[in-house]
Image (cartoon, rainbow, N blue to C red):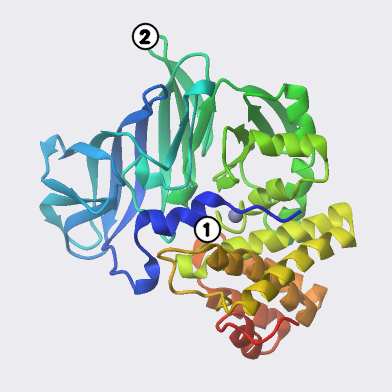
């Protein structure tokens, strides 16, 4: 089976209308913490929210710009005092009451509402709502993957719904009108695109895997079916943790939602109900859930600093999926993945669509561009494994992962770690396979 793609991230640079590859000017501030309270209206496909943003000035700062999608911001205040703001080009520009000196921190309160066309998916027929990567579409925030902050997220929902969110679940609160406020706290700074939640008229199952609680949610599947669909989860987490050199952190939730190609968030992955059926029909169809689980390390904890290094997230998740399949299902399963990548790369080359993995033009990625990042990226990791041998390759990969846990990385970080493991320069390999279109598939 070809590993399916995380559609949200594929579309993200396009949706954001930006790309970090054009040497975006420094933001001038570092977000430390968001505290967000959301009230979705599932039937109306609308949301209202209020949030506090705490940030630190990295230079003398008189204005602050956040991504805000199509949200309509109704007020921005600081210590109860209204601040001037303007919205343009899916951004929110805020004028601070008093300029901040470098190193000073401040808090702002923002109120907003909107009807996001993406980033927040409403499925009223299932009484379901879930997020889809483009976090700034439902909370003003910084979309760039090199910005990490902690998060308090509260979502107020009708009483019959279950919810899963990013971070540690805090006790729910029952409001006077019977609605339930679900709350989560993400204590570890994470990039904004992995914030989110899913809520619906779910059934659920839980299992304990060592210190990790596994939780599965679906509208359509029974708890017994959910345990069958996600039976390999603990085994996957163990495999990736061993390869990463880092144990899984926190609890892990997986939800089958109305429609998605698959997406990872912090401690929460979403797949579609249709995918759940695929796994019930054929228990070997676990590549997608492995891909999303792999992102816990490669993507969420070690994150590409800009979308031009996106192959470090997606090529790596595809490669790690194949490595897991190799262990779980045997050599043929690994080779089938490799063959799929190579076939796609051959097709790209046949029509002149191959290009470097570090790819500077993600403004409007095509299917071919995505194939380069997802498939060729994985294939190049397979080639590097062959070049270095298993012992050196896995030692280097583990060192890279451990050294960059909680950091945003560029391709040079990966190259350096692998060169250290190899004991020699890998520049010729990276020049051929990573930084240029290369010549011919080997
Ligand atoms: Zn992915």
Residue at horizontal 61%, vertical 59%? Answer: 298
Asked if the residues shown at circle 1 and circle 2 are in contact, with their CB atoms under 8 angstroms apart, the answer is: no
Residue at disc 1, secondary structure: loop
> In the shown orientation, is residue 196 left or right of residue 234?
left
Label 1, label 2: how far apart the Cα atoms are: 40 Å
Q: Could you tell me residue 365's position as x and y percent? A: 47, 64
Q: Quadrant of the C terminus?
A: bottom right
Q: Is residue 184 above or below residue 62?
A: above
Disc number lying in front (1 or 2): 2
The residue under the point 45% across, 16% down is: 158
Judging depth in this view, the residue of 137 and 392 nearest the camera is: 137
279 lies above or below 17: above
Q: Where is 181 relative to 38, above or below?
A: above
Residue 399 in view here = no
The residue depicted at 64 percent of the width and 49 percent of the height is: 292
| Residue that label 1 marks | 406
Image region (quadrant) for ligand 1: bottom right
Q: Compared with residue 134, is residue 47 higher up or lower down, i.e. above or below? A: above
Rendered image quadrant of residue 428? bottom right
Task: Tell me where residue 100 sits by quadrant.
Answer: bottom left
Residue beneath disc 2? 177
- Circle 2: element type: loop
Q: Is mark 2 within 8 Å of ligand 1?
A: no
Judge by depth and name the residue closer to the eye, 80 or 166: 166
């Amino acid at each position: 089976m070809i590993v399916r793609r995380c559609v949200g991230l594929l579309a993200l640079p396009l949706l954001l209308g930006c790309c970090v590859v054009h040497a975006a000017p420094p933001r001038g501030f570092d977000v430390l913490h968001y505290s967000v309270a959301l009230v979705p209206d599932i039937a109306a496909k609308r949301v209202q929210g209020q949030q506090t943003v705490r940030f630190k000035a990295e230079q003398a700062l008189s204005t602050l710009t956040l991504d805000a999608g199509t949200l309509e911001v109704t007020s921005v205040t600081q210590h109860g005092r209204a601040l001037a703001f303007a919205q343009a080009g899916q951004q929110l520009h805020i004028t601070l009451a008093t300029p901040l000196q470098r190193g000073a921190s401040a808090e702002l309160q923002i109120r907003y509402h909107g009807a996001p066309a993406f980033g927040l998916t409403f499925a009223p027929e299932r009484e379901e709502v879930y997020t889809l990567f483009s976090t700034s579409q439902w909370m003003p925030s910084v979309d760039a993957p090199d910005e990490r902050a902690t998060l308090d997220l509260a979502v107020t929902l009708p009483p019959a719904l279950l919810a899963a969110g990013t971070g540690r679940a805090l006790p729910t609160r029952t409001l006077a009108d019977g609605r339930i406020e679900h709350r989560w706290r993400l204590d570890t700074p994470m990039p904004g695109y992995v914030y989110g939640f899913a809520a619906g008229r779910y059934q659920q199952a839980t299992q304990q895997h060592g210190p990790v609680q596994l939780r599965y949610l679906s509208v359509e599947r029974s708890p017994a079916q959910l345990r069958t669909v996600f039976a390999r989860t603990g085994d996957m987490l163990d495999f990736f943790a061993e390869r990463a050199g880092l144990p899984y952190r926190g609890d892990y939730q997986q939800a089958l939602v109305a429609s998605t190609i698959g997406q990872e968030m912090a401690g929460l992955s979403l797949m579609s109900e249709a995918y759940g059926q695929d796994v019930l029909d054929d228990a070997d169809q676990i590549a997608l859930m492995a891909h999303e689980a792999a992102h816990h390390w490669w993507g969420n904890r070690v994150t590409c600093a800009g979308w031009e290094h996106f192959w470090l997230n997606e090529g790596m998740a595809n490669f790690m999926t194949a490595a897991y399949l190799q262990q779980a299902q045997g050599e043929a399963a690994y080779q089938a993945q490799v063959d799929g990548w190579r076939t796609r790369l051959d097709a790209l080359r046949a029509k002149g669509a191959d290009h470097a993995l570090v790819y500077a033009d993600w403004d409007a990625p095509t299917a071919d561009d995505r194939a380069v990042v997802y498939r060729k990226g994985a294939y190049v990791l397979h080639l590097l494994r062959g070049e270095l041998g298993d012992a050196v390759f896995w030692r280097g990969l583990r060192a890279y992962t451990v050294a960059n846990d909680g950091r945003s990385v560029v391709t040079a970080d990966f190259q350096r770690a692998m060169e250290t493991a190899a004991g020699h320069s890998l520049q010729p390999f990276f020049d051929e396979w990573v930084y240029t279109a290369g010549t011919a598939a080997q």
